[in-house]
Image: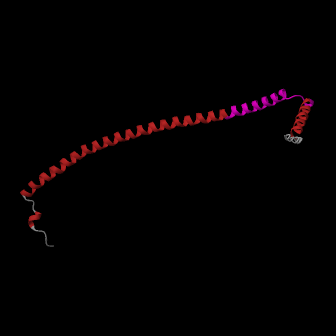
Amino acid sequence: MTNVLPERLLVWEEGSLRALLPSIAVALLCAACGASDLDARRARLGAERRALEATLDHLEDRLLVNQARVRFWKEMQARHESVTAVACASQEEHAIEMARHVLPDEPARRAGRRASIDRARVAAAPRAAPAPARAAPTP
């Protein structure tokens, strides 16, 4: 098999090695700097993570407080409805008893109703036509 590449490329020359050393040094330096850059990035991401966790903890606390408020106001609503129902029933009984106390007994109530009907009849009766006016005497 014959070699197609020129001999110059196959043999390392002293000049080509000198040109290669700075490239290797730059590559190693970049790799070393990349590690410290990676550490800085990890530290920054860790700080961001802690900040997000703190924010989420704060939001969770607010959510729990708001849930407690909602439970409290629902309980207050239920209590209010219960007290209102009791108050309405008590007021109704009280109104009935007051009506019994204020209104006269049954026979007197009938007489009172009869009198009011009589008054209504008198008010509705037609009135007599007024007498015609006399004519004034002529002089």
Q: Position of residue 126 (x, y in %)?
A: 88, 42
For the residue pair 80 and 138, the one nearer the viewer reads as 138
| Residue farthest along the top direction in this orientation | 101
- Please identify the quarter of the rendering in which residue 111 is found: top right
Looking at the image, which residue is at 55% across and 34% down? Answer: 69
For the residue pair 98 and 9, the one nearer the viewer reads as 98
The magenta span reads 81-107
Q: Position of residue 92 (x, y in %)?
A: 77, 32
Looking at the image, which residue is at 9% across and 62% down? Answer: 11
Q: Is residue 35 magenta?
A: no
Q: Is residue 94 magenta?
A: yes
Q: Position of residue 61 (x, y in %)?
A: 48, 35
Q: Position of residue 56 (x, y in %)?
A: 44, 39
In-image side of 3 versus 40 (left or right): left
Instruction: Kindly report the secondary structure that dominates the magenta region of the rendered protein.
Output: helix
For the residue pair 121 and 95, the one nearer the viewer reads as 121
In-image side of 106 versus 6 (left or right): right
- Please identify the quarter of the rendering in which residue 134 is found: top right
| Residue farthest along the front direction in this orientation | 139
In-image side of 28 versus 99 (left or right): left
Count of residue discs:
0
For the residue pair 10 and 124, the one nearer the viewer reads as 124
| Residue farthest along the bottom direction in this orientation | 1
In-image side of 17 versus 71 (left or right): left
Q: Which quadrant, please, contains the N terminus?
A: bottom left
Visual colour scheme: secondary structure
Looking at the image, which residue is at 89% across and 32% down? Answer: 112
Q: Which quadrant, please, contains the C terminus?
A: top right
- Please identify the quarter of the rendering in which residue 123 is found: top right
Whether 11 is drawn above or below 101: the answer is: below
